[in-house]
Amino acid sequence: MGVKSPIAANPLRTKADLELAFSQLTKPLLPYYSAGGARLGLNGSGAGQSPDVAQMEGFSRIIWGLAPLAAGSGKVDEELLQLVLKGITNGTDPAHAEYWGKVADYDQRLVEMASLGLALAIAPQRLWEPLSDRAKQRFYDWLNQINSHKSHDCNWLFFHVLVNVGFHKLGLPYAKDQLDSNLNRLEDFYLEDGWFEDGVNGHSDYYVPLAFHYCGLIYAALMKEEDPERAARFEERGAVFARQFANWFSEDGRALPYGRSLTYRFAQGALWGAYAFAGVQPFEPGVIKGLYLRHLRWWLSQPIFSSDGVLTVGYSYPNLIMAENYNAPGSVYWAFKAFLPLALPDDHPLWQAEELPLPELPAISVQKAPHLVICRHGERDHIAAFNAGHRSTNEHTHTSAKYEKFVYSASFGFSVPRAEWGLSQGAYDSMLALSEGDNLYRVRRKNEETHIDGDVLTSVWKPWRDVTVKTYLLAGLPWHLRIHRIETARELDAAEGGFALPLDSLPQVSTQAGSVIGRTGFGSSGITGLQGFERAELVSVQSNTNLMHQRTSIPTLLTKLKPGKHVLVSAVYGEPGAEEEISPDQWRDRIGLSVEPDRIKAISPSGKEIIIDL
């Protein structure tokens, strides 16, 4: 289990608090720098990249916070600064044992060059000028490799942009044509309402705020005179996106866990600081400040550190099960992107403003570009994202769990499978899992069709070539409705999972025919079968499968399906802090369900009558 933050006593309310926080978070790292300073060798597991590259990655990710700090007040820990300058000198020297090496196409080091490009652009007085002329030339030569190697056709293109902006700001030769080409290519990924897709048919997840808009706003701030039209476009799209993105955050600062790369943690909210850096005001400064600081305070109160104060791989606790193949021990320090506002002067409106609560947000926010409908409810500001699913997929770790669950909750979190055998190992919260009776389950991975009409989300997916599932979600909180029309040529076992219930105490379990509700000190989670299910149970799933809670159980409906056509209907309930039990009869009364052979009528959680032609 992780331990509480080494900065637990830091109130995180002022610029001075944030400067101190950076020092408190980097001080434990100092013993892990290599003798030559060019590598940060943290303890932990391996990753897809070689150990040398992983340690270079750790070195570079600290720069995301160090460069803004050096550009602002300059209150930089001298020991850290000298280590970094030593590391740059040795890491870019082909004759040194810690040379960072020649890069290849699609190399992880192309990603890590971006923070160094930012350093050249905003903090040359501390991270460039102190170098010798020879070291400067080698530093430039090493970074310039990015101009002769291919990057993945996605958010990676922005890393090339930041390096060349750094060169340009120093008056060094830079690849202007390639820079323009990459910026134009990034335009092709724009969708609507401020959203991008991460490459052709890519997902719209946290890479939109922490890469596309974050880097776009940095470009706008630094290149406004040279490229005013593009800068204005980045600013305008960023402002539009903020009005959608704010719906992903609760009043206490937590954000929706959704998609990959969640181990970057408080990078989730780094964009709020980037708005201030770029002078873009989608909300008044006090609202931006509140979103930014509450998010940091929430994260830095979680047990996400090792005993010596180093950030761990995981989400709200150390957890390798949820990690990506590319998550090395130092990868997590992409979280330092959140320190960009340290570059701002003490009298900037962000630091002078009074912290304000969230802006007024709707109970339901339809966000068609990422295929989501965001709902919020109750005194605990429960937020859940209902997911229509995607037409394409990728091969990243736990793709189905991270992109294809029916609902993602900022309170209940979501789960990833620990192994492939059975419901306990699979941890199928907010999913319909299907098996041929062999205890090996398939879930939604990609969709033949996907559609959103207000608070009704529809998808068609095929777990086997001769099995078709049409799923309807009637979004809402604290309960929602799920309808599946299944055509199958094979016998199947079906399991429908609700929200994963945190086991912070022994659960009180209420089971009726076709219904199960569990209640702990955290809140309540339950599921009721309204059509087609045979029984319900609270499935005890394996530990560390949920990203936010180490031990959980999942309310689950179960049935067997013969070859043919079937309609399964369930009502799913989840409420953090719920003190009173909600009975299945109350759900049935509210839903007003009517099932005909080819039509279903129901009352949605928002109170609208819904007619679904099957």
Image (cartoon, rainbow, N blue to C red):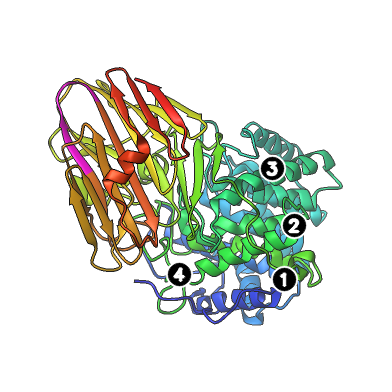
Q: Position of residue 261 (x, y in %)?
A: 47, 52
In magenta, the rendered stretch is 557-566
Closer-to-camera residue (580/613): 580
State the separation of the CA atoms marked 3 and 2: 14 Å
State the separation of the CA atoms marked 1 and 2: 27 Å
Q: Nearer the viewer, mark 1 or mark 3?
A: 3
Closer-to-camera residue (574/154): 574
Instruction: Tell me the residue that label 1 is attached to.
Output: 70
Q: Amino acid at mark 3?
A: Val
State the separation of the CA atoms marked 4 and 2: 28 Å
Closer-to-camera residue (462/254): 254
State the separation of the CA atoms marked 3 and 4: 31 Å
Instruction: Give the number of callouts.
Output: 4
Sequence-first disc among 1 and 2: 1
Q: Residues within 10 Å of mark 1 (few under 14, many from 20)?
A: many
Q: Quadrant of the C terminus?
A: top left
Mark 1 residue element: helix
Q: Nearer the viewer, mark 4 or mark 1?
A: 4
Q: Residues within 10 Å of mark 2 (few under 14, many from 20)?
A: some
Q: Position of residue 302 (x, y in %)?
A: 45, 69
State the separation of the CA atoms marked 1 and 3: 31 Å
Indicate which disc residue 240 carries: 3
Q: Amino acid at mark 2?
A: Glu
Instruction: Tell me the residue that label 2 is attached to.
Output: 284
